[in-house]
Amino acid sequence: MNEETGQLPKAWCKTVASILKEAKPGTVFIRQRARRDWASLTSCPFDSALREVLADALGTEGLKGKKHYMDEPGETHSFIFRYGDSPLYTKINLTSQNQIVIVYFAHRPLKGEDL
């Protein structure tokens, strides 16, 4: 079930970006699909590059997204941002303890650039 589309919460963006940048062991989990899709899009398939790109994107002023409910507890949002000349769709969960980030997707938008 999805909620409305709107501006991503600034506190959520700041916390997720911080966790992605710090990348302490056991704090960032990138699903295999996100890892495969990211590797197929770029010449740099490393998790560190994906974390860096996502953290930078979360610093974009006025970033719009959509809230989702996933099996894992936490606050999950999807959003589309520009990576070079291409749009990139991602879905990220900040767990309810605000200590772990789960990256579900990192691929070109499959349904256009609207969420």
Image (cartoon, grey):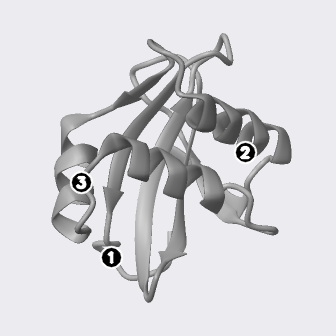
Kindly identify the residue that appears in the image at 26 percent across and 68 percent down. 42
Is there a contact, CB below 8 Å, between mark 1 and mark 3? Answer: no
Which one is in front, 70 or 33? 33
Sequence-first disc among 1 and 3: 3
SS category of the residue bearing label 1 = loop
Q: Looking at the picture, which amino acid does disc 2 mark? A: Cys
Within-10-Å neighbours for mark 2: few <14, some 14–19, many 20+: some
Residue sticking out furthest to the bottom: 85
Q: Residue 13: which disc? A: 2
**Dividing the picture into quarters, in which one does residue 45 lie?**
bottom left
**For discs 1 and 3, the disc positioned in front in the rendered view:** 3
Label 1 and label 3: CA atoms lie apart by 24 Å
Picture quadrant where residue 62 is located: bottom right
Residue occupying image coordinates x 50% and y 33%: 69
Alpha carbon separation for disc pair 2 and 3: 23 Å
Where residue 59 appears, as percent x and y from the top left, is: 74, 58
- Pointer 3 residue: 45
Q: Secondary structure at mark 3?
A: loop
> In the rendering, at what x and y percent does residue 93 appear?
52, 33
Q: Position of residue 37 (x, y in %)?
A: 21, 57
Residue 87 percent coordinates (x, y): 43, 78
Q: Is residue 75 visible?
A: yes
Residue 111 numbered mark, or none: 1
57 relative position to 6: left or right: left
Amino acid under disc 3: Pro
Around disc 1, counting alpha carbons within 10 Å, would you say few (fewer than 14), some (14 to 19), or many (20 or more)? few
Q: Give above or below for 53 relative to 26.
A: below
Question: Is 43 displayed left or right of 109 in the figure?
Answer: left
**Which residue does the image show at 19% across and 37% down from the upper left?**
32
Judge depth for marks 1 and 2 and give the one in front. 2
First in sequence, mark 2 or 3: give its number: 2
The answer to whether 33 is drawn above or below residue 26 in the figure is: below
